[in-house]
Amino acid sequence: STSCWHRDASRADIVAEVPEIAFNSLQRFAVCTRNGARLGNEDRFRAIDNLDLYGRGLLEVAPASLPPFFTDLLQGRVLENFVVEGRAPALKIRNLLKHERSEDTQFYGVYDGHGGARASSLLALLFPVYILAAPEYCNDLAAACHSASMAINEEILKREKDGHCEGGATAVTLLIRDNKAVLSNTGDCRAIMVAKRDKVAQVTQLTTDHKASNDQEKQRIEEHGGMVLYVKGVARVNGRLAVARAFGDSELSQLVIADPEVTVHDLHREDEFIVMASDGLWDVLTNEQVASCIRNNPWLNVQEMANMLADRAVELGTMDNVTVVVVDVRGRVS
């Protein structure tokens, strides 16, 4: 498994792959990230092929043999030099994984920062741990996603109040277990399913874009005393932020909420790939175009697919960072 974040959160231009624990020799996923037209990259991602094994590794591996970031976690500190200053949350790590599971849980996340990379960095680092620590983890992944999201947002807002974090981030997180895909979405990162049913290619959007232009989000914002104003043709909350849901953004937190939209999708034999990406991809490619890129190039492996999609977005002139995660779900359902 790989994790894409850098120990120095001020170096948003660096995207580093950090080895974690080798969970599975079969590549079931791939990630690609590009700066796009930006000088730096505020996107972060997390990919853990077996979350249960990851959690047991935190508990059982001898601290001397752990990479520094695991050691910090076991000691109750969450990479202060990574998320910059501030006191880290004290998690009861020993409460993780109280029950053994026969089925592994896959974890994938894309976190798109704005106004800096500290909020997206915190999300990438904390989301898997908060989900593992959630009391609902074993029996209700959807509820665990909601609990984790709200707890992490409180941590980010607390850091913003103390001056140790700024800006905000949108997020889409995917958990796969027992032939079910659980999507937790806050903001305008998006996930789609590429499938082939009755020998016909099909694409389904799995998440909702929480943009200020969304009618339901606009109504909610106005009911809470806010406004949606168009600035240079883009709908923005109080004329400022284009997303209606995000982590952080303390100045707009009464209007821009972190509440995730959590959905559960049964996986079918015809399902092939789940594509998750930050809005830098979706700004220039439709769901159907992304699906066509994959379906029209069946000889590509998942890494080549992710690279192709990110590079295509850059070629089309996306003005934002682009991070793409492709998850191969073929063969999961017999």
Image (spheres, rainbow, N blue to C red):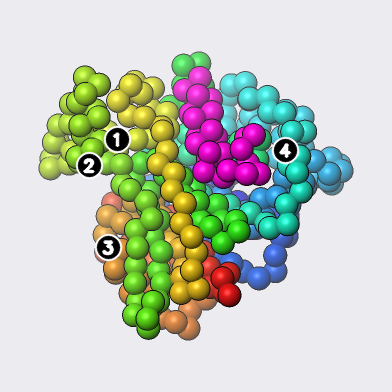
Q: Callout 4: 10 Å neighbours few (<14), some, many (20+)?
A: many
Q: Callout 2: 10 Å neighbours few (<14), some, many (20+)?
A: some
Question: Furthest-top residue in view?
Answer: 162
Amino acid type for the residue under numbered disc 3: Thr
Residue at 35%, 63% in the rendered image: 204
Q: Which mark is residue 244?
A: 1
Is residue 157 a member of the stretch shown in magenta? yes
> As drawn, is 26 to the left or to the right of 323?
right
Q: Nearer the viewer, mark 4 or mark 3?
A: 4
Residue at 30%, 25% in the rendered image: 255
- Marks 4 and 2, how far apart in space? 38 Å
Amino acid type for the residue under numbered disc 2: Asn
Task: Magenta stretch: give its range.
Answer: 134-158
Q: Earlier in the sequence, mark 3 or mark 1?
A: 1
Q: Nearer the viewer, mark 1 or mark 4?
A: 4
The reply to whether callout 3 and callout 2 are in contact (CB within 8 Å) is: no
- Marks 1 and 4, how far apart in space? 33 Å
Q: Nearer the viewer, residue 4 or 315?
A: 4
Disc 4 target residue: 96
Q: Nearer the viewer, residue 321 or 326?
A: 326
Q: Is residue 72 above or below residue 189?
A: above
- Marks 3 and 1, how far apart in space? 21 Å
Quarter of the image for the C terminus: give it: bottom right
The reply to whether callout 2 and callout 1 are in contact (CB within 8 Å) is: yes
Disc 2 target residue: 214
Amino acid type for the residue under numbered disc 1: Ala
User: What kind of element bears circle 4?
Assistant: loop
Rendering quarter of residue 55: top right
Residue at 32%, 29% in the rendered image: 256
Quarter of the image for the N terminus: give it: bottom right
